[in-house]
Amino acid sequence: MSFSTNIKNELTHQETTRSERLAILSAFFRNNAIYTEDKIELITENSTVAKYLFQLVKDTYQVTLQIEQKRNNNFAKNSLYILTVNEKIELILKDLSVLSENGFYLLEPLEYMVSTIEDQRAYLRGLFLAKGSVNDPKTSRYHLEFSIDTIEEAEFDQDLLNNFDLNSKIISRDKGYMLYVKEAEKIGDFLRIINATKALLYYEDIRIYRDHKNMTNRLNNCEQANIDKTIETATKQVEDINYLIEEVGLDLLDEKTQEAARYRLKYPESSLLELSEIISVETNNKITKSGLNHRFRKIKELVQRIKNLH
């Protein structure tokens, strides 16, 4: 069972007020219903959502619905569930802000449908039940999306999401529009807004684990990069010292720099910090990492001068 399916199943078990039920139904009807003068058809691929809608519409409008299961042509899914309403068509569509009082399609729901924060959250629950999906954080990138048919509905839904600071975006598709959220933290906020508590706990557990794992990987990468840099630097210093020995010897260097050169050849893989500590202990003359680096810089400059003469 997919993560999106688990969320939808959880949403169908929430206690709601009448106002919230109307907002949920408005979002679903506006985004996932086919209607004519004599019937309304609600379509879903989720049997639990189908039963939930059946009861919600029946209790809210005291109508009889038929529910039919059909084979889906989409091979990724097994069935479609079609709920059909044959009574009070006009009343329901106007009450749910799908049609205006004059019987025209409303490009967006009337203001009263989402006049409170709780109604806005309920509308988003209905929208997710109708058109929403979230990638499982365990197996994929973070991604929440809604497939919307009209630009007006997409922009209305975007405004609703962004009222909660979710930073949602819209892109055009061949058929309709995709409204989406990609930031991991914002997707968690969305699950909190629609009261999908179990899904939120699962999501945050996985997100925290992934963030910790990514941080560990970044630290390991930084550590490896530092090791590589240390080896590269030490190798270059050994090359410079060997070049001097072959060309002119070490006598052109002062005593302390000769000492640094000998210790570098003796400990070719040590970092500057490690080498400074070794020299300090073995010679009883303290030298800092910075001081040692200065001596190797003198060797490098001498090598460069000799090469320029050739």
Image (cartoon, rainbow, N blue to C red):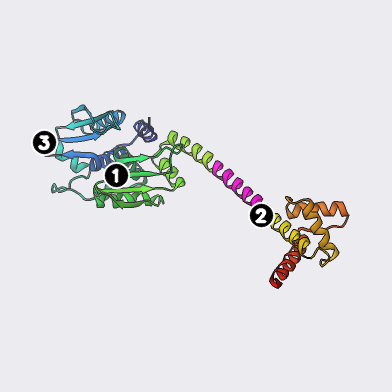
- Of the two numbered discs 2 and 3 in the rendering, the one whose residue sits closer to the viewer: 2
Q: Which residue is painted at 29% across and 44% down in the image?
A: 147
x and y percentages locating residue 138 in the rendered image: 46, 37
Return the residue found at the far bottom: 309
CA distance for labels 2 and 3: 79 Å
Q: Secondary structure at mark 2?
A: helix
Is there any visible trace of residue 287 in the rendered image? no
Q: Which residue is painted at 40% across and 50% down in the image?
A: 166
Q: Amino acid at mark 2?
A: Glu
Task: Give the residue pinned by disc 1.
Answer: 147
x and y percentages locating residue 295 in the rendered image: 77, 63
Is 310 in the magenta? no
CA distance for labels 3 and 1: 27 Å
Is there any visible trace of residue 298 in the rendered image? yes
- Of the two numbered discs 1 and 2 in the rendering, the one whose residue sits closer to the viewer: 2
Q: Which residue is painted at 68% across and 53% down in the image?
A: 230
Along the polypeptide, which appears first: circle 2 or circle 3? 3
Q: Secondary structure at mark 1?
A: strand
x and y percentages locating residue 16 in the rendered image: 34, 35
Q: Which mark is residue 38?
A: 3
Q: Would you say 21 lies left or right of 83 here?
A: right
Task: Give the residue pinned by disc 2.
Answer: 232
Give, as a single range, the part of the protein colored magenta: 212-231
Task: Tell me which secondary structure the magenta stretch mostly adopts.
Answer: helix
Crowdedness near tag 3: few (<14), some (14–19) or many (≥20) residues, C-alpha within 10 Å: few
